[in-house]
Protein backbone atom coordinates (compact mmCIF):
# COMPACT_ATOMS: atom_id res chain seq x y z
CA UNK A 1 0.00 0.00 0.00
CA UNK A 2 1.11 3.58 -0.58
CA UNK A 3 2.87 5.03 2.44
CA UNK A 4 2.35 8.57 3.66
CA UNK A 5 6.09 9.04 3.92
CA UNK A 6 9.10 6.79 3.61
CA UNK A 7 8.42 3.28 4.85
CA UNK A 8 5.50 4.19 7.12
CA UNK A 9 2.41 2.15 6.28
CA UNK A 10 -1.03 3.75 6.32
CA UNK A 11 -3.33 1.24 8.03
CA UNK A 12 -6.41 2.98 6.64
CA UNK A 13 -5.19 2.28 3.10
CA UNK A 14 -4.58 -1.37 3.98
CA UNK A 15 -8.12 -1.60 5.33
CA UNK A 16 -9.48 0.01 2.19
CA UNK A 17 -7.57 -2.43 0.01
CA UNK A 18 -8.84 -5.46 1.94
CA UNK A 19 -12.42 -4.18 1.76
CA UNK A 20 -12.25 -3.63 -1.99
CA UNK A 21 -10.49 -6.97 -2.55
CA UNK A 22 -13.13 -8.83 -0.55
CA UNK A 23 -15.99 -7.11 -2.40
CA UNK A 24 -14.33 -7.95 -5.73
CA UNK A 25 -13.88 -11.59 -4.71
CA UNK A 26 -17.50 -11.73 -3.60
CA UNK A 27 -18.61 -10.49 -7.01
CA UNK A 28 -16.29 -12.91 -8.86
CA UNK A 29 -16.73 -15.90 -6.53
CA UNK A 30 -19.26 -17.78 -8.66
CA UNK A 31 -17.23 -17.20 -11.80
CA UNK A 32 -14.04 -18.46 -10.11
CA UNK A 33 -15.83 -21.51 -8.69
CA UNK A 34 -17.04 -22.34 -12.20
CA UNK A 35 -13.48 -22.11 -13.58
CA UNK A 36 -12.17 -24.62 -11.04
CA UNK A 37 -10.91 -27.66 -12.97
CA UNK A 38 -7.39 -28.06 -11.55
CA UNK A 39 -6.14 -29.89 -9.55
CA UNK A 40 -9.62 -31.29 -8.82
CA UNK A 41 -12.88 -29.99 -10.37
CA UNK A 42 -14.53 -29.44 -6.98
CA UNK A 43 -15.89 -25.97 -7.76
CA UNK A 44 -14.85 -24.15 -4.59
CA UNK A 45 -11.73 -22.10 -5.40
CA UNK A 46 -13.56 -18.77 -5.44
CA UNK A 47 -15.37 -19.55 -2.22
CA UNK A 48 -12.16 -20.66 -0.50
CA UNK A 49 -10.24 -17.53 -1.53
CA UNK A 50 -13.16 -15.35 -0.45
CA UNK A 51 -13.29 -17.00 2.99
CA UNK A 52 -9.52 -16.63 3.41
CA UNK A 53 -9.57 -12.89 2.69
CA UNK A 54 -12.75 -12.48 4.74
CA UNK A 55 -11.02 -13.86 7.82
CA UNK A 56 -8.07 -11.51 7.31
CA UNK A 57 -10.37 -8.54 6.77
CA UNK A 58 -12.26 -9.17 10.00
CA UNK A 59 -8.96 -9.28 11.89
CA UNK A 60 -7.58 -6.01 10.56
CA UNK A 61 -10.84 -4.17 11.15
CA UNK A 62 -10.92 -5.54 14.69
CA UNK A 63 -7.35 -4.30 15.23
CA UNK A 64 -8.23 -0.85 13.91
CA UNK A 65 -11.30 -0.66 16.17
CA UNK A 66 -9.17 -1.59 19.17
CA UNK A 67 -6.53 1.02 18.34
CA UNK A 68 -3.70 -1.43 17.63
CA UNK A 69 -0.53 -0.10 16.04
CA UNK A 70 0.30 -1.06 12.45
CA UNK A 71 2.69 -3.84 13.45
CA UNK A 72 0.12 -5.51 15.69
CA UNK A 73 -2.63 -5.09 13.11
CA UNK A 74 -0.55 -6.67 10.34
CA UNK A 75 0.45 -9.56 12.61
CA UNK A 76 -3.22 -10.20 13.36
CA UNK A 77 -4.00 -9.98 9.64
CA UNK A 78 -1.35 -12.59 8.86
CA UNK A 79 -2.51 -14.99 11.57
CA UNK A 80 -6.17 -14.65 10.60
CA UNK A 81 -5.39 -15.42 6.95
CA UNK A 82 -3.52 -18.53 8.06
CA UNK A 83 -6.30 -19.70 10.39
CA UNK A 84 -9.05 -18.91 7.90
CA UNK A 85 -7.39 -20.44 4.82
CA UNK A 86 -9.52 -22.97 2.97
CA UNK A 87 -8.61 -25.24 0.07
CA UNK A 88 -5.48 -25.41 -2.05
CA UNK A 89 -5.66 -21.86 -3.44
CA UNK A 90 -6.81 -20.40 -0.12
CA UNK A 91 -3.82 -21.86 1.69
CA UNK A 92 -1.41 -20.60 -0.97
CA UNK A 93 -3.05 -17.18 -0.82
CA UNK A 94 -2.68 -17.08 2.97
CA UNK A 95 1.06 -17.73 2.57
CA UNK A 96 1.31 -14.90 0.04
CA UNK A 97 -0.54 -12.49 2.31
CA UNK A 98 1.53 -13.56 5.30
CA UNK A 99 4.87 -13.12 3.54
CA UNK A 100 3.70 -9.79 2.14
CA UNK A 101 2.94 -8.28 5.55
CA UNK A 102 6.14 -9.68 7.06
CA UNK A 103 8.21 -7.70 4.54
CA UNK A 104 6.03 -4.61 4.97
CA UNK A 105 6.47 -4.84 8.75
CA UNK A 106 10.25 -4.78 8.30
CA UNK A 107 10.15 -1.59 6.24
CA UNK A 108 12.27 1.33 7.42
CA UNK A 109 11.45 5.06 7.17
CA UNK A 110 14.30 5.62 4.69
CA UNK A 111 13.13 2.89 2.27
CA UNK A 112 11.25 3.81 -0.87
CA UNK A 113 7.71 2.50 -0.73
CA UNK A 114 7.96 1.16 -4.27
CA UNK A 115 10.96 -0.99 -3.32
CA UNK A 116 9.27 -2.26 -0.15
CA UNK A 117 6.15 -3.32 -2.04
CA UNK A 118 8.06 -4.93 -4.91
CA UNK A 119 10.27 -6.89 -2.52
CA UNK A 120 7.21 -7.88 -0.49
CA UNK A 121 5.55 -9.30 -3.59
CA UNK A 122 8.71 -11.14 -4.60
CA UNK A 123 9.12 -12.63 -1.12
CA UNK A 124 5.44 -13.62 -1.06
CA UNK A 125 5.85 -15.44 -4.36
CA UNK A 126 9.05 -17.19 -3.24
CA UNK A 127 7.36 -18.29 -0.03
CA UNK A 128 4.39 -19.68 -1.94
CA UNK A 129 6.55 -21.72 -4.30
CA UNK A 130 8.47 -23.03 -1.28
CA UNK A 131 5.26 -24.00 0.50
CA UNK A 132 3.96 -26.13 -2.39
CA UNK A 133 5.26 -29.68 -2.52
CA UNK A 134 5.41 -29.81 -6.33
CA UNK A 135 4.89 -26.39 -7.92
CA UNK A 136 2.90 -26.47 -11.17
CA UNK A 137 3.01 -23.71 -13.77
CA UNK A 138 -0.21 -22.37 -15.24
CA UNK A 139 -1.64 -21.86 -11.75
CA UNK A 140 -1.87 -19.11 -9.14
CA UNK A 141 1.89 -19.46 -8.69
CA UNK A 142 2.55 -18.46 -12.30
CA UNK A 143 0.36 -15.39 -11.99
CA UNK A 144 2.09 -14.45 -8.73
CA UNK A 145 5.56 -14.80 -10.26
CA UNK A 146 4.69 -12.67 -13.28
CA UNK A 147 3.20 -9.99 -11.05
CA UNK A 148 6.18 -9.97 -8.69
CA UNK A 149 8.72 -9.81 -11.52
CA UNK A 150 6.88 -6.86 -13.05
CA UNK A 151 6.74 -5.13 -9.67
CA UNK A 152 10.50 -5.52 -9.16
CA UNK A 153 11.25 -4.16 -12.63
CA UNK A 154 8.99 -1.15 -12.09
CA UNK A 155 10.56 -0.41 -8.68
CA UNK A 156 13.98 -0.06 -10.30
CA UNK A 157 12.85 3.33 -11.60
CA UNK A 158 13.75 5.78 -8.79
CA UNK A 159 10.64 7.83 -9.64
CA UNK A 160 8.29 4.88 -9.19
CA UNK A 161 5.84 4.89 -6.30
CA UNK A 162 3.93 2.08 -4.63
CA UNK A 163 0.90 2.69 -6.81
CA UNK A 164 3.04 2.30 -9.95
CA UNK A 165 4.39 -1.01 -8.67
CA UNK A 166 0.93 -2.44 -8.03
CA UNK A 167 -0.39 -1.21 -11.36
CA UNK A 168 2.49 -2.95 -13.16
CA UNK A 169 1.94 -6.11 -11.10
CA UNK A 170 -1.79 -6.19 -11.80
CA UNK A 171 -1.24 -5.76 -15.54
CA UNK A 172 1.39 -8.52 -15.62
CA UNK A 173 -0.92 -10.76 -13.60
CA UNK A 174 -3.74 -10.32 -16.11
CA UNK A 175 -1.41 -11.17 -19.01
CA UNK A 176 -0.05 -14.25 -17.22
CA UNK A 177 -3.58 -15.38 -16.35
CA UNK A 178 -4.64 -15.24 -19.99
CA UNK A 179 -1.77 -17.58 -20.87
CA UNK A 180 -2.51 -20.21 -18.19
CA UNK A 181 -4.81 -21.99 -20.65
CA UNK A 182 -1.73 -22.72 -22.76
CA UNK A 183 0.26 -24.13 -19.83
CA UNK A 184 -2.03 -26.78 -18.32
CA UNK A 185 -3.72 -29.52 -20.32
CA UNK A 186 -6.77 -29.57 -18.02
CA UNK A 187 -7.31 -25.87 -18.61
CA UNK A 188 -6.84 -26.22 -22.37
CA UNK A 189 -9.40 -29.01 -22.58
CA UNK A 190 -11.93 -27.08 -20.51
CA UNK A 191 -11.18 -23.83 -22.32
CA UNK A 192 -10.74 -21.84 -19.12
CA UNK A 193 -8.06 -19.86 -17.30
CA UNK A 194 -6.83 -21.05 -13.92
CA UNK A 195 -9.31 -20.41 -11.11
CA UNK A 196 -6.68 -19.61 -8.46
CA UNK A 197 -4.87 -17.33 -10.87
CA UNK A 198 -8.12 -15.54 -11.62
CA UNK A 199 -8.69 -15.04 -7.90
CA UNK A 200 -5.22 -13.57 -7.42
CA UNK A 201 -5.75 -11.30 -10.43
CA UNK A 202 -8.94 -10.02 -8.80
CA UNK A 203 -6.93 -9.10 -5.69
CA UNK A 204 -4.18 -7.40 -7.69
CA UNK A 205 -6.78 -5.44 -9.65
CA UNK A 206 -8.31 -4.34 -6.32
CA UNK A 207 -4.93 -3.00 -5.22
CA UNK A 208 -4.62 -1.04 -8.46
CA UNK A 209 -8.12 0.37 -8.02
CA UNK A 210 -7.48 1.51 -4.44
CA UNK A 211 -4.14 3.14 -5.20
CA UNK A 212 -4.81 4.67 -8.62
CA UNK A 213 -8.58 5.00 -8.88
CA UNK A 214 -8.54 3.03 -12.12
CA UNK A 215 -10.76 0.01 -12.69
CA UNK A 216 -8.78 -2.31 -14.97
CA UNK A 217 -10.58 -4.58 -17.40
CA UNK A 218 -10.17 -8.12 -15.98
CA UNK A 219 -9.47 -11.36 -17.78
CA UNK A 220 -12.99 -12.60 -17.18
CA UNK A 221 -15.08 -15.49 -18.42
CA UNK A 222 -18.84 -15.20 -17.83
CA UNK A 223 -20.65 -17.75 -15.69
CA UNK A 224 -22.49 -20.18 -17.91
CA UNK A 225 -19.91 -20.17 -20.70
CA UNK A 226 -17.65 -22.57 -18.82
CA UNK A 227 -18.66 -24.88 -16.01
CA UNK A 228 -17.10 -27.64 -13.98
CA UNK A 229 -16.99 -30.77 -16.17
CA UNK A 230 -19.31 -33.07 -14.23
CA UNK A 231 -19.91 -35.93 -16.63
CA UNK A 232 -18.56 -39.18 -15.38
CA UNK A 233 -18.50 -39.55 -11.61
CA UNK A 234 -15.09 -40.75 -10.46
CA UNK A 235 -13.82 -40.27 -13.99
CA UNK A 236 -13.98 -36.55 -13.36
CA UNK A 237 -11.04 -36.96 -11.01
CA UNK A 238 -7.53 -37.46 -12.29
CA UNK A 239 -7.07 -41.13 -13.19
CA UNK A 240 -5.48 -42.80 -10.20
CA UNK A 241 -5.49 -39.48 -8.33
CA UNK A 242 -6.13 -39.16 -4.59
CA UNK A 243 -9.70 -39.39 -3.34
CA UNK A 244 -9.56 -37.12 -0.31
CA UNK A 245 -8.55 -33.59 0.61
CA UNK A 246 -7.11 -33.39 4.13
CA UNK A 247 -6.58 -30.08 5.90
CA UNK A 248 -5.59 -29.28 9.45
CA UNK A 249 -3.97 -26.64 11.58
CA UNK A 250 -0.80 -27.84 13.24
CA UNK A 251 0.94 -26.63 16.38
CA UNK A 252 4.51 -27.74 15.78
CA UNK A 253 8.10 -26.56 16.12
CA UNK A 254 9.30 -25.06 12.86
CA UNK A 255 12.17 -27.55 12.60
CA UNK A 256 9.65 -30.44 12.47
CA UNK A 257 8.06 -29.16 9.25
CA UNK A 258 10.66 -30.45 6.76
CA UNK A 259 10.14 -33.98 8.07
CA UNK A 260 6.38 -33.51 7.88
CA UNK A 261 6.62 -32.45 4.24
CA UNK A 262 8.88 -35.37 3.42
CA UNK A 263 6.36 -37.76 5.01
CA UNK A 264 3.31 -36.28 3.32
CA UNK A 265 4.78 -35.85 -0.18
CA UNK A 266 4.73 -39.58 -1.14
CA UNK A 267 1.16 -39.99 0.15
CA UNK A 268 -0.49 -37.92 -2.58
CA UNK A 269 -0.32 -34.54 -4.29
CA UNK A 270 -1.29 -30.86 -3.95
CA UNK A 271 0.80 -30.65 -0.78
CA UNK A 272 0.93 -27.17 0.72
CA UNK A 273 2.30 -26.40 4.20
CA UNK A 274 2.26 -22.75 5.21
CA UNK A 275 2.79 -20.80 8.40
CA UNK A 276 5.58 -20.33 10.89
CA UNK A 277 6.34 -19.48 14.51
CA UNK A 278 4.79 -22.70 15.73
CA UNK A 279 1.48 -22.56 13.80
CA UNK A 280 1.00 -24.20 10.40
CA UNK A 281 -1.80 -24.84 7.94
CA UNK A 282 -1.45 -28.21 6.20
CA UNK A 283 -3.21 -29.17 2.97
CA UNK A 284 -2.78 -32.38 0.96
CA UNK A 285 -4.72 -34.68 -1.39
CA UNK A 286 -4.36 -38.35 -0.39
CA UNK A 287 -6.02 -41.75 -0.40
CA UNK A 288 -4.80 -42.67 3.10
CA UNK A 289 -6.44 -40.09 5.37
CA UNK A 290 -5.14 -41.77 8.51
CA UNK A 291 -1.54 -41.61 7.36
CA UNK A 292 -1.85 -37.90 6.59
CA UNK A 293 -3.20 -37.18 10.06
CA UNK A 294 -0.65 -39.46 11.73
CA UNK A 295 2.12 -37.48 10.03
CA UNK A 296 0.73 -34.39 11.70
CA UNK A 297 0.60 -36.10 15.07
CA UNK A 298 4.23 -37.10 14.68
CA UNK A 299 5.16 -33.47 13.99
CA UNK A 300 3.02 -31.77 16.63
CA UNK A 301 -0.63 -31.27 17.51
CA UNK A 302 -3.09 -31.25 14.59
CA UNK A 303 -6.47 -29.64 15.18
CA UNK A 304 -9.45 -28.36 13.16
CA UNK A 305 -9.07 -31.40 10.91
CA UNK A 306 -11.21 -31.29 7.75
CA UNK A 307 -11.54 -34.24 5.36
CA UNK A 308 -13.37 -33.93 2.03
CA UNK A 309 -14.19 -36.90 -0.20
CA UNK A 310 -13.85 -35.58 -3.75
CA UNK A 311 -16.34 -38.02 -5.30
CA UNK A 312 -19.01 -36.95 -2.81
CA UNK A 313 -18.15 -33.29 -3.30
CA UNK A 314 -18.44 -33.58 -7.08
CA UNK A 315 -21.68 -35.54 -6.76
CA UNK A 316 -23.00 -32.76 -4.53
CA UNK A 317 -21.93 -30.21 -7.13
CA UNK A 318 -23.83 -32.23 -9.76
CA UNK A 319 -26.93 -32.17 -7.57
CA UNK A 320 -26.46 -28.47 -7.08
CA UNK A 321 -26.29 -27.94 -10.85
CA UNK A 322 -29.84 -29.28 -11.12
CA UNK A 323 -30.94 -26.27 -9.09
CA UNK A 324 -30.97 -23.01 -10.99
CA UNK A 325 -31.66 -19.34 -10.49
CA UNK A 326 -32.31 -17.24 -7.41
CA UNK A 327 -35.52 -16.96 -5.41
CA UNK A 328 -36.65 -14.73 -2.60
CA UNK A 329 -38.55 -16.18 0.37
CA UNK A 330 -40.61 -13.66 2.31
CA UNK A 331 -42.59 -14.17 5.52
CA UNK A 332 -45.94 -12.36 5.27
CA UNK A 333 -48.10 -11.13 8.14
CA UNK A 334 -51.35 -10.60 6.23
CA UNK A 335 -53.24 -11.42 3.02
CA UNK A 336 -52.54 -8.05 1.41
CA UNK A 337 -48.84 -8.39 2.20
CA UNK A 338 -48.90 -11.93 0.81
CA UNK A 339 -50.22 -10.50 -2.45
CA UNK A 340 -47.59 -7.73 -2.48
CA UNK A 341 -44.67 -10.08 -1.90
CA UNK A 342 -46.01 -12.62 -4.38
CA UNK A 343 -46.62 -9.99 -7.04
CA UNK A 344 -42.97 -8.94 -6.66
CA UNK A 345 -41.86 -12.50 -7.41
CA UNK A 346 -41.20 -13.82 -3.90
CA UNK A 347 -42.18 -17.22 -2.55
CA UNK A 348 -44.41 -16.32 0.39
CA UNK A 349 -44.53 -18.11 3.73
CA UNK A 350 -47.63 -17.23 5.74
CA UNK A 351 -46.75 -15.80 9.15
CA UNK A 352 -47.79 -13.09 11.55
CA UNK A 353 -48.44 -12.90 15.31
CA UNK A 354 -49.19 -16.28 16.78
CA UNK A 355 -48.38 -18.21 13.62
CA UNK A 356 -44.75 -17.49 12.87
CA UNK A 357 -43.17 -20.10 10.59
CA UNK A 358 -41.01 -22.83 12.06
CA UNK A 359 -37.50 -23.66 10.93
CA UNK A 360 -38.91 -26.73 9.20
CA UNK A 361 -41.42 -24.68 7.22
CA UNK A 362 -38.70 -22.32 6.01
CA UNK A 363 -36.40 -25.25 5.18
CA UNK A 364 -39.18 -26.92 3.16
CA UNK A 365 -39.71 -23.70 1.23
CA UNK A 366 -35.99 -23.45 0.44
CA UNK A 367 -35.83 -27.05 -0.75
CA UNK A 368 -39.00 -26.89 -2.83
CA UNK A 369 -37.97 -23.60 -4.48
CA UNK A 370 -35.64 -25.49 -6.85
CA UNK A 371 -33.27 -22.51 -6.73
CA UNK A 372 -29.51 -22.63 -6.43
CA UNK A 373 -29.56 -19.36 -4.50
CA UNK A 374 -32.13 -18.26 -1.95
CA UNK A 375 -32.53 -14.97 -0.09
CA UNK A 376 -34.80 -15.01 2.97
CA UNK A 377 -36.73 -11.97 4.25
CA UNK A 378 -38.00 -13.07 7.70
CA UNK A 379 -39.73 -9.73 8.43
CA UNK A 380 -39.98 -10.17 12.20
CA UNK A 381 -37.38 -10.80 14.95
CA UNK A 382 -38.47 -14.33 15.87
CA UNK A 383 -38.46 -15.47 12.25
CA UNK A 384 -34.92 -14.11 11.79
CA UNK A 385 -33.64 -16.76 14.18
CA UNK A 386 -35.64 -19.57 12.56
CA UNK A 387 -34.48 -18.48 9.11
CA UNK A 388 -30.84 -18.54 10.22
CA UNK A 389 -31.09 -22.15 11.35
CA UNK A 390 -32.92 -23.16 8.17
CA UNK A 391 -30.29 -21.42 6.03
CA UNK A 392 -27.39 -23.25 7.68
CA UNK A 393 -29.19 -26.57 7.37
CA UNK A 394 -30.02 -26.01 3.69
CA UNK A 395 -26.43 -25.11 2.85
CA UNK A 396 -25.09 -28.20 4.61
CA UNK A 397 -27.68 -30.74 3.51
CA UNK A 398 -29.00 -29.48 0.19
CA UNK A 399 -26.02 -27.57 -1.29
CA UNK A 400 -28.11 -24.41 -1.65
CA UNK A 401 -26.56 -21.00 -1.23
CA UNK A 402 -28.72 -19.10 1.26
CA UNK A 403 -28.56 -15.60 2.71
CA UNK A 404 -30.78 -14.27 5.47
CA UNK A 405 -31.40 -10.52 5.43
CA UNK A 406 -32.35 -9.73 9.04
CA UNK A 407 -35.51 -7.77 8.30
CA UNK A 408 -37.51 -7.34 11.50
CA UNK A 409 -40.57 -5.67 9.98
CA UNK A 410 -42.79 -6.20 6.96
CA UNK A 411 -41.96 -2.76 5.57
CA UNK A 412 -38.24 -3.55 5.69
CA UNK A 413 -38.91 -6.67 3.64
CA UNK A 414 -40.89 -4.67 1.08
CA UNK A 415 -38.04 -2.14 0.80
CA UNK A 416 -35.42 -4.86 0.38
CA UNK A 417 -37.48 -6.69 -2.24
CA UNK A 418 -37.93 -3.48 -4.21
CA UNK A 419 -34.17 -3.30 -4.94
CA UNK A 420 -33.71 -7.02 -5.67
CA UNK A 421 -32.01 -7.49 -9.03
CA UNK A 422 -31.58 -11.10 -10.27
CA UNK A 423 -29.02 -10.02 -12.88
CA UNK A 424 -26.60 -8.94 -10.15
CA UNK A 425 -24.20 -11.37 -8.56
CA UNK A 426 -25.56 -13.07 -5.45
CA UNK A 427 -23.35 -11.23 -2.96
CA UNK A 428 -23.91 -7.86 -4.61
CA UNK A 429 -27.68 -8.41 -4.60
CA UNK A 430 -27.72 -9.44 -0.94
CA UNK A 431 -25.53 -6.47 -0.04
CA UNK A 432 -27.85 -4.00 -1.78
CA UNK A 433 -30.99 -5.53 -0.25
CA UNK A 434 -29.42 -5.59 3.20
CA UNK A 435 -28.27 -1.97 2.98
CA UNK A 436 -31.74 -0.86 1.88
CA UNK A 437 -33.42 -2.75 4.72
CA UNK A 438 -31.03 -1.29 7.30
CA UNK A 439 -31.55 2.26 6.04
CA UNK A 440 -35.32 1.93 6.20
CA UNK A 441 -36.65 3.53 9.39
CA UNK A 442 -39.81 1.71 10.40
CA UNK A 443 -42.68 2.27 12.78
CA UNK A 444 -46.25 1.19 13.49
CA UNK A 445 -49.31 1.81 15.61
CA UNK A 446 -51.21 -0.82 17.57
CA UNK A 447 -53.77 -1.16 20.32
CA UNK A 448 -52.71 -2.42 23.76
CA UNK A 449 -54.29 -5.83 24.49
CA UNK A 450 -53.27 -5.85 28.16
CA UNK A 451 -51.83 -3.69 30.90
CA UNK A 452 -48.06 -3.46 30.65
CA UNK A 453 -44.99 -1.36 31.34
CA UNK A 454 -43.41 -0.03 28.16
CA UNK A 455 -40.47 2.22 27.36
CA UNK A 456 -42.97 5.05 27.09
CA UNK A 457 -44.51 4.24 30.50
CA UNK A 458 -47.45 2.12 31.72
CA UNK A 459 -50.29 1.40 29.33
CA UNK A 460 -53.87 0.24 29.81
CA UNK A 461 -56.00 -2.05 27.67
CA UNK A 462 -57.22 -0.09 24.65
CA UNK A 463 -54.43 2.50 24.66
CA UNK A 464 -52.92 3.38 21.30
CA UNK A 465 -49.22 2.52 21.18
CA UNK A 466 -46.70 4.05 18.80
CA UNK A 467 -43.81 1.83 17.77
CA UNK A 468 -40.40 2.74 16.30
CA UNK A 469 -37.84 0.06 15.41
CA UNK A 470 -39.75 -2.50 17.49
CA UNK A 471 -39.91 -0.40 20.68
CA UNK A 472 -43.03 1.20 22.18
CA UNK A 473 -42.17 4.90 22.30
CA UNK A 474 -45.54 6.64 22.55
CA UNK A 475 -48.85 6.08 24.35
CA UNK A 476 -52.05 7.90 23.36
CA UNK A 477 -55.77 7.58 22.92
CA UNK A 478 -56.28 8.49 19.28
CA UNK A 479 -54.99 6.39 16.39
CA UNK A 480 -54.57 9.32 14.02
CA UNK A 481 -52.76 11.49 16.55
CA UNK A 482 -50.31 8.72 17.52
CA UNK A 483 -49.76 7.73 13.88
CA UNK A 484 -48.87 11.28 12.81
CA UNK A 485 -46.53 11.73 15.77
CA UNK A 486 -44.71 8.52 14.82
CA UNK A 487 -44.50 9.73 11.22
CA UNK A 488 -42.97 13.01 12.37
CA UNK A 489 -40.34 11.17 14.40
CA UNK A 490 -39.47 8.93 11.47
CA UNK A 491 -39.25 11.92 9.12
CA UNK A 492 -37.13 13.86 11.59
CA UNK A 493 -34.03 12.25 10.11
CA UNK A 494 -35.06 13.20 6.58
CA UNK A 495 -36.48 10.99 3.89
CA UNK A 496 -37.81 10.88 0.36
CA UNK A 497 -40.38 8.06 0.48
CA UNK A 498 -42.99 7.07 3.06
CA UNK A 499 -44.58 3.63 2.79
CA UNK A 500 -47.89 3.03 4.59
CA UNK A 501 -49.34 -0.47 4.98
CA UNK A 502 -52.93 -0.55 6.17
CA UNK A 503 -53.99 -3.35 8.50
CA UNK A 504 -57.15 -4.66 10.12
CA UNK A 505 -59.09 -1.98 12.00
CA UNK A 506 -57.36 0.83 10.12
CA UNK A 507 -60.64 2.68 9.31
CA UNK A 508 -59.11 5.09 6.79
CA UNK A 509 -55.96 5.65 8.87
CA UNK A 510 -53.56 5.13 5.95
CA UNK A 511 -55.45 7.61 3.75
CA UNK A 512 -55.44 10.17 6.59
CA UNK A 513 -51.68 9.77 7.03
CA UNK A 514 -51.11 10.06 3.29
CA UNK A 515 -52.95 13.39 3.29
CA UNK A 516 -51.04 14.50 6.37
CA UNK A 517 -47.66 13.90 4.70
CA UNK A 518 -48.83 15.71 1.56
CA UNK A 519 -49.81 18.76 3.66
CA UNK A 520 -46.78 18.85 5.98
CA UNK A 521 -43.98 17.29 3.87
CA UNK A 522 -44.79 18.12 0.26
CA UNK A 523 -41.36 17.00 -0.96
CA UNK A 524 -41.90 13.43 0.32
CA UNK A 525 -43.54 10.77 -1.85
CA UNK A 526 -46.06 8.39 -0.28
CA UNK A 527 -47.17 4.90 -1.31
CA UNK A 528 -50.08 3.11 0.36
CA UNK A 529 -50.70 -0.62 0.42
CA UNK A 530 -53.48 -2.74 1.88
CA UNK A 531 -51.58 -5.28 3.97
CA UNK A 532 -54.44 -6.82 5.94
CA UNK A 533 -52.15 -7.59 8.89
CA UNK A 534 -53.57 -8.28 12.34
CA UNK A 535 -52.85 -6.23 15.50
CA UNK A 536 -51.20 -3.36 13.65
CA UNK A 537 -53.71 -0.99 11.99
CA UNK A 538 -50.81 0.77 10.30
CA UNK A 539 -47.23 -0.09 9.43
CA UNK A 540 -45.02 2.69 8.13
CA UNK A 541 -41.49 3.25 6.90
CA UNK A 542 -39.30 6.09 5.70
CA UNK A 543 -36.50 5.77 3.15
Image (cartoon, rainbow, N blue to C red):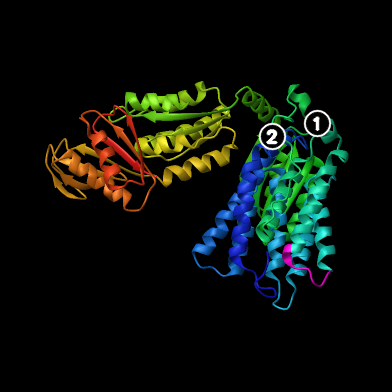
Tell me the residue at 79%/58% (across/down): 168
Quadrant where the N terminus sits is: bottom right
- Secondary structure, mark 1, is helix
Residue at the disc numbered 1: 190
Q: Residues within 10 Å of mark 1 (few under 14, many from 20)?
A: some
Estimate the x, y position of residue 337 in percent, counting from the top left.
Answer: 35, 28
At a point 61% along the width and 63% down the height, the residue shown is 13
Q: Nearer the viewer, residue 424 or 48?
A: 424
Q: Is residue 326 above or below residue 289?
A: above
Q: Residue at x 31, y 28 (%)?
A: 530
Q: Are marks 2 and 1 in contact (CB under 8 Å)?
A: no
Residue 200 in view: yes
The label on residue 225 is: none
Q: In this rendered view, identify the residue nearer to me: 138 or 527.
A: 527
Secondary structure at numbered mark 2 = loop
Quadrant (top left/top right/bottom left/bottom right) for the C terminus: top left
Q: Position of residue 119 (x, y in %)?
A: 78, 65
The magenta stretch is 157-163
Residue 484 x %, y %: 23, 44
Dominant secondary structure, magenta = loop
Residue 160 belongs to magenta span: yes
Q: What residue would you read off at disc 2?
A: 43
Q: Nearer the viewer, mark 2 or mark 1?
A: 1
Q: Earlier in the sequence, mark 2 or mark 1?
A: 2
Evaluate whether residue 536 shows in this view: no
Reply above or below: 433 against 238.
Answer: below
User: With 507 as the anchor, is 154 left or right in this view?
Assistant: right
Residue 517, position in %: x, y? 29, 43
Apparent side of residue 466 relative to residue 377 in the rendered image (left or right): left
Magenta stretch contains residue 443: no
Of the pair 369 and 312, the residue shown nearer to us: 369
Amino acid sequence: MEAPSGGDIDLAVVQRFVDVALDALAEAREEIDALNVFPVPDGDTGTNMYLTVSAARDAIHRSAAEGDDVSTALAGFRRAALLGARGNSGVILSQMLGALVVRISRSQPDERNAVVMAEAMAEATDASYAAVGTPVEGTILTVARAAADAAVRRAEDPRARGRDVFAAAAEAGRIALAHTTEQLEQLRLAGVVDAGGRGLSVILDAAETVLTGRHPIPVKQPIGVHTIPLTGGQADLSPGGPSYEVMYLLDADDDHVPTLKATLAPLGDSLVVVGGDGLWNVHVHVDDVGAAIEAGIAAGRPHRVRVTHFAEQIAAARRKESRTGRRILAVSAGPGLTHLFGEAGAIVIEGGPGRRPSTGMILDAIESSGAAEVVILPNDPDSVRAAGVAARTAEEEHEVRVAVIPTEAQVQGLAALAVHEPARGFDADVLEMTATARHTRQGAVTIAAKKAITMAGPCEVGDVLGVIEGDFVLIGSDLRDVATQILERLLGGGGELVTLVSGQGADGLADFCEAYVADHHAHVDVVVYDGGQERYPLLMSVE
